[in-house]
Amino acid sequence: VKRRRLLRFVGLAAWVSAALAGLAVAADNPFRLKPGAAGKLCLDCHADVEAVMALPHVHTPVESGACADCHDPHASSHGKLLAESPERICLECHDDITADGLVSSHDLVLAGNCATCHDPHGSENPSNLIRAGNDLCRECHAELAASVASAKFGHPPARDDCLSCHDPHGSTTARSLLRQLEPDLCVDCHDATGGQFRSRHLGYPVEAGRCTSCHDPHGSDQGSILWANVHRPVGNRMCDQCHGAADSQTALETKREGLDLCRGCHSELVNQTFNAGHVHWPVVDKKGCLNCHAPHASAENGLLTQPMKPLCEGCHRDIAIRAERSVAKHEPVEAGECTSCHDPHAGSSPLLLASSNTIELCGNCHDWRQHTAHPLGEDAVDTRNPNLFVDCVSCHRTHGSPHDHLASFDVKADLCVDCHETFRR
Amino acid sequence: MPRRFHAVLIVAWTAWSLLGVVHAQAVRLRPSPTPIYSGREGVALAEPQGVACRDSTVVIADTGNARLVGFAIEGGALRPVSVWPTGQITMPLHVEIGSGGEFWVLDGRRLQIGRFSADGEFVGFLELGDGDRSVVPRSFRVDPKGDLYVLDARASRVLVVTPEGDERRKIASPPELLFASDLALGPQGTVYVVDSVGHRVYSASKGDKVLAPLSDDLSEDLDFATSIAVDERGNLFLGDQNGGGIVVLGRDGSFRGRQSRYGWKPGMLRYPTGLCVDRGVLFVADRGNNRVQMFEVAE
């Protein structure tokens, strides 16, 4: 009885393993191609792929003839008979590329546009890249590449190989796809203990700071690859104007906080700000001026931390949304020239306008006398509100509107009759 | 017995559901057809930024004219009572009525809170922190006991101080609170703070040391809220400065509607900046329209 049971068990086990093996074979060869037919069969028609096979770098499935790993030979809902959408197909094998916990990631990778950089079949270049080295990055980052090339004082790694500092897929540690956090990334090459390094930085322990607060890692026309706009004390090598002595325990800390520190030199501006009446509130918080300005150097005029448009939109996103949805565009809003109309520090009007009289303010760019014969100004009382006179914003919304001409209402149906109600039909 | 128990359960459940339905009802704001355009002597309001109301008294911070404009509510109607120049406070941004009838006014130029007697006499400035703008009041409220809740823009926190400026309590804000513009005090002593940039309301109950998010992200429903008020039922009102409207939230922070819209006519708003609510009436400092509007709160 025992032997019979054992035989039954062995038989069952053999059957199960045969079935599993069959399943595995089916998974490996879902189209039940004849042995040796994989790949070769496709090449019968797709002869051009044979040239790819001769390239120095060939994608593993192509090399092994596993065309069906990516393509469905019969039919597909996707172009090129791909077995998955172009955005997903690579992730079937390379799912580690979009790992969790990335601090920064390349937009192309997130969007699944792998073929922008890689040839899925094969290439002359390692990793099947469609171009070698920095030429590939230049395709999209042309403006940056041009400035790298033309910089009077270049940074060799930026000129030679973007990948010295950046991971093209994403970084789990740092912003901007950087392979490491600053300053670790920089001190890999720059010996912070060296005499020249220390004397160039006046003995300050900058290796504990952020190098890009002064230096443009892509090269610059300024000596020491400083950013294009340098705060005067930095340019004059007078760090102790704001910081403690280089050999002190608090060398990298500022002597005072926020506005109180900047007031030392910019007292006139600070006084104007407080006398104006309506202060831009970020000016008076703990960070103060540093909410918008870089203390050492910047690529932007006025030492702004970033171009004005994204800087202002960081808080005033609603304005950006209104402008984006607007039918007509107001040029300064589109160009991000917020300071054309607003004073970013303070103003005598609540909206921090450069002039509280909008007719005067708009008149800086628009010749309203030619623009309209409509009564404007203090003698033209708004019929909707006895406490207002008619001015430019009686009809227009300056940042954007769903109507033509930046009008507050539909120009044909509602704008005029909002005041002139007797003419409403 | 089980049947009776079931019946009790069903009745309780029905009552609870009905209560929920009532609670979730939208709050409507009925605008008064006659906004406040001027005070007792007939001078037009100019960019009023603040309004305070308590015990049938309404005081407007008439910012552009550097004065306070007072009204009494009598039989549901407003009667202009007095106009007080704010003297050395040249930019009155926010006004509150104290428990003793005195006025507290935030000066936008000095960034200090000044105290006025009930007769409008300037008493002095409130001393906060160690001077030299270590505390920068962005807004403030006065509780029934007379303590001031000051929203400190410098350190993004709420300071609770006595009328003499002695600190009673600090409420910190969490790092995700991006820019606190205004605060309100609920009937149970809860502090509510509106985050203009993060489009959220935060709250702290009695004893809490840090503000916690109360509402969801409201960016779909408002543009840039800079004022907040709470009524005796716990309804929260947010003044959407850039969007021209009032957003109403329940006491749990749930969205209960958006009222009014950008415009010039009575009932419409342009850059509302100050709110207060008293006995079922919401007062709105309608800065861009140089007036104060009243809305009856109806559920």
Image: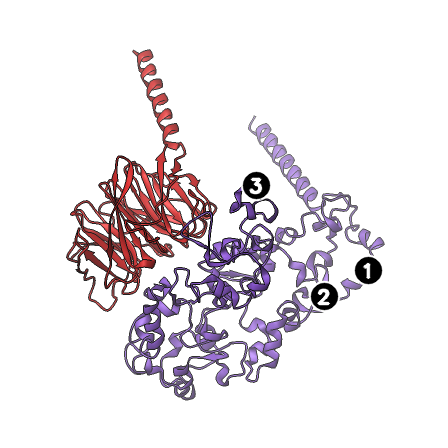
Chain colours: A purple, B red
Give the alpha-carbon distance from disc 1 to disc 3, as whole Å: 71 Å
Residue beneath disc 1: A48
Residue placed under numbered mark 2 in the picture:
A123
Q: Is residue B261 above or below residue B4?
A: below
Instruction: Have a look at marks 2 and 3 and say if they share a chain.
Output: yes
Mark 3 Cα-neighbour bin, 10 Å: few <14, some 14–19, many ≥20: few
**Which quadrant holds the N terminus of chain A?**
top right
Q: Are marks 1 and 2 on the same chain?
A: yes
How far apart are labels 1 and 2 at the CA level? Answer: 14 Å
Image coordinates of residue A161 in percent, x first then y, are 59, 75
Residue at 37% from the left image edge and 65% from the top image edge: A348
Along the line of sight, which residue is nearer the eye, B27 or A373?
A373
Q: Is residue A138 above or below residue A313?
A: below
Q: Residue at x 32, y 21 (%)?
A: B12
Q: Nearer the viewer, residue B102 or B188?
A: B102
Q: Secondary structure at mark 1?
A: helix
Judge left or right: residue B85 versus residue A39.
left
